[in-house]
Amino acid sequence: MTNWRAHMMATAIVTALSAIGPALAQEPPPLPAGLSPAETSGDREQTDEPVPNPPALPADLDAATPADRAPEKGTRKPPSPPLGLTGFIDARSGARIIADPTQKTLSIGELRAQLGRDVETNIATFRFVGDFFYDQVEDVSDADIETGHGFFDLREANALVRPLPFLDIKAGRQILTWGVGDLVFINDLFPKDFRSFFIGRDDEYLKAPSDAIRLSAFSEIANIEFVYTPRFDADRFITGDRISYFNPALQRLAGRDAIIDAQSPTEWFKDDERAARIYRSVAGYEVALYGYSGYWKTPEGVTAAGQPFHPRLAVLGGSLRGPLKGGLLTAEFGHYFSRDDLRGDNSLVRNGETRFLAGYEREIASELTASVQYVGEYISDYGALESALAPGATAPDRMRHLITLRLTKLMLNQTLTLSGFNYWSPNEQDGYFRFRASYKLSDAWLAEAGGNIFYGVDEDTFFGQLENNTNLFVGIRRYF
């Protein structure tokens, strides 16, 4: 099948999935053994809404807080904030441990207050979550809720209604996540914030908000979700303003001296995105099919004038998750159709590719959990890409290999959590090691320290270019 026909099939599947609705029952099917509601994939967001099959974040991305738990015996319950608000105050400070002439030594220095409020009525449930913060590294005199810069970040502002017993509709700003990967995203084409991820903010900030409408329908045959984003939501990607990177045009590491100004699609209802997921339990495993039509979330194209932009993208994929020999097996794949380079012969636009992963997680000792993943990224039209390169330019490896390893240890009656997560690419010879130690001083107080260590042989590989951003940080958080 040609790439053109594959693209037409991707668009048809997304359209068909969004139109499915007949024969829906009133309740979702029961989960198979080994897949508790906390293990199901889907919209892994912080919510108290009575949604069937409540999904969960992947390990180390759980945004839930102990704010609503009763205090331990003998402790005094902290005062409640006015107007029924919940949230926290978080202070963090960190610094680079490798000299970077293009960036400040201070990698993070901020005071953040998150405030949230849920309002339930007979018609709908309304949710608002916003962050106010002061940042010593960036200019916070203004606020841009699209990019997350400034003194205010609107995380959620949405309404949830259930017009039918089997149908949920959620509209507004919300956090969305699909797929089964552990800090690896294949069919999750919702925005991420890699700047926050790399400088030591809490892991919940890896997920950037989407301005979308989500329809969720549940039946005994299958569960269906359709997400419509009326205007493209890009990743909060690396631009050089805070994290240095390899600039291909300059052929060197760059940062504040070469800020990326990407051309993004911004027209409402024209530059839109559509994503669909259909999932159900089969023989004890949760299986899912995905479709997406929109744009690359990072600027993977360059115009003839040299300006980065977001090319069009379509994705078809699937995933599987279920119990295996006392652990949890995960698998996922997705084929990326680069719609502005369907023949693969445009060296200024990222080629289409197939991405896949296989992972396994289990407890290997008392309160010690280990998980491992293998991830592959295979370029589709490699021959055409090589022929299109300028004289003297070299093509990347046709296949990028990536191996991840996570270890998590709970200690001191589960008040102390030690975790380490390592990405390593054997063919690009680079990697990224994240480590965290968090200690729960009480139900209201949490202390954390950690680091982001980047390494690589070459400065133009995915993680190798970030080596100068290696940093250590500490933080303290007060829930209310």
Image: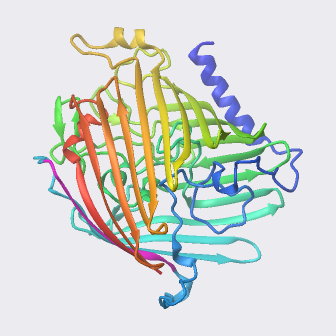
| Total numbered labels | 0
- The image quadrant of residue 278 is top right
Q: Is residue 250 left or right of residue 419?
A: left
- The image quadrant of residue 361 is top right
Q: Quick one: 5 or 265, which is closer to the camera? A: 5
278 over 71 or under it: above or below: above
436 over 188 or under it: above or below: below
Q: Is residue 190 magenta?
A: no
125 over 76 or under it: above or below: above
Q: Quick one: 199 or 136, which is closer to the camera? A: 199
Q: Residue at x 21, y 32 (%)?
A: 459
Q: Is residue 191 left or right of residue 140?
A: right
Q: Residue furthest front?
A: 366
Give the dominant element type of the magenta stretch: helix, strand or loop: strand
Chosen colour scheme: rainbow
Q: Residue at x 63, y 60 (%)?
A: 171
Give the x, y percent position of residue 232: 50, 46
Q: Quick one: 166 or 169, which is closer to the camera? A: 166
Q: Residue at x 53, y 83 (%)?
A: 72
Q: Which residues are magenta?
A: 86-98
Where does the N terminus fall, quadrant-wise? top right
Q: Quick one: 463 or 449, which is closer to the camera? A: 449
Give the x, y percent position of residue 19: 77, 41
Give the x, y percent position of residue 345: 41, 14
Q: Residue at x 48, y 66 (%)?
A: 414
Q: Is residue 301 left or right of residue 451?
A: right
80 over 244 or under it: above or below: below
Give the x, y percent position of residue 184: 48, 40
